[in-house]
Image: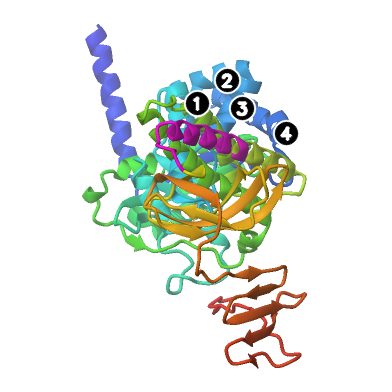
Amino acid sequence: MMKKLIFPLLFVLGISTHVDAQKPYKAYMVSNTHLDTQWLWTVQTTIDHYLYRTLTQNFWLIDHYPGYIFNFEGAVRYQWAKEYYPTEYERLKNYIKAGRWNISGSSWDSTDPNIPSPESFFRNLLYGQEFFKKEFGKKSNDIFLPDCFGFGYTLPTIAAHSGIIGFSTQKLQHRKLPFYGDHKLPFMFGLWEGIDGARIMAVPHAQDYVSRFDGQELSNNGKLVDLAKNGLNNTVYHYYGAGDRGGSPTIASVRSVETGMKGEGPVQIISARSGQLFDDYYPFEKHPELPVFKGELLMDVHATGCYTSQAAMKLFNRRNELLADAAERASVVAEWLGGATYPEEPLRESWQRFLWHQFHDDLTGTSIPVAYTFSWNDELIAQSEFAEITTGAVGAVSRALDTRTRGISVVVYNPVAQSRCDIVTATVDMASQPKDIVAVAPNGKKVSGQLLSWQNGKATVLFPVDMDPVSFSVYDVRSGKISGTKQLKAESNILENSIYKVVLDKNGDIASITDKRNGRELVEPGKAFRLALFTPSESHT
């Protein structure tokens, strides 16, 4: 009896799938709720209100619509859900396991792809995927950035080398003018090739993330038919949902997708994961019809001014990127020499503390002023933590070095992976105030230094160094003077050596240049040299 029941059931299912496959058009309907971690509100509002309603509203939709799949990005938001809403978090884990709630985007948060360093971008993906794997046993396969302000050429390369196969956005529809021939976009979807030839699939125009439907059955939707006709293989990838403050798609929109999945119209409606289209076309080599684009996906007017906004935020971010790199390199050497244990967790916490502020409305400078009190706080804490780790690691390395010198030993650390000539500032113990400073390099070469200040036995000095890549060098700092050297005189607005005397006015302009050898003034009185840089602008606006 069981065999007789099972066979007809399998036959019906097979026929149904076959019928869907024969429909002339296909629409991947990707639900989402775009949540700005900070923008016209602070992170407190996001956690207290927007995150909670995102969880509960979508739980309700999942429970009431069996075909509904919800997509949500940003591992840090999942971490906040775990911390602040533990009961809902356990429920969330079950929905993820059942495939009803899809973890999208792969990253720690929805990062701006233009300002952060490549290493920061890699870390954003690393820590995001690591969290998803640990908490849910699965990873995301896509970069999900509905609302950034342009996308640099490094994105496909970084994504591909992070094991990610696709990228989607809707922001590029806000371009004002054509950029690729007569069009704003290179294609509706295709392959985006990075600077090293690596490729990912890209959807540069996924339609508005706040798209909604009024309950109509979508398999007959004329707009979807038109979009699919203009897409490759009669296919369209289409966001729908809510924007900025979290929440969920409307009930009517979810009902439209649900009924459309069972509809008899010409469009096959798929309630899709954000990366499902990419899976369906992977491996891409089997789809030679996919167009290939090489270049950047840029905005022209919308929001581009943000890249010169909130300069302090951008400075703090870059400091953290440099300090994090220096701390990690020094810590590796310290552990290798047996001087200290590698501080894996403190480094991870510090990275994550400032990485989420690379969110596209935070680092870029488009949030309200009060939001930056939270951002700066995290940035400065991370800087202090990285600096403390670096100091401890360099100290551990120093104990393995030969620091015996005639004067005061100063260990100079170059964290950069190339040879470097630079100026070092150090504060050292000197019982009496020195008149001149000499520094002796490891190879025995003496260089002139400069005393910046001396007080209560503490001297702040600077001296030039010449260092190998990623190296630790012991310099011998002494009180003294190199005979026969030309001394540079520097005051608040004067630079002078044996050849020239340069005087700056109160505006920082060059008011006077005296050629001491020929007794000539090179600047006409009242006509100071203003230092200015003019760069060509090819703006189409």
Q: Viewer-nearest of labels 2 and 3?
A: 3
Of 468 and 201, nearer the camera is 468
Tag count = 4
Residue that mark 2 sits on: 89
Q: Is residue 327 left or right of residue 2?
A: right
First in sequence: mark 3 vs mark 4:
4
Residue that mark 3 sits on: 80
Q: CA distance from mark 2 to mark 3?
A: 9 Å
Q: Viewer-nearest of labels 1 and 4?
A: 1
- Above or below for 300 versus 109: below
Res. 345 mark: 1
Residue located 27% across and 48% down the image: 284
The span shown in magenta is 383-405
For the residue marked with disc 3, what is the amino acid?
A: Trp
Of 293 and 361, nearer the camera is 361
Residue located 35% across and 56% down the image: 194
Question: Residue 491: horizontal and vertical position, in percent?
Answer: 70, 68
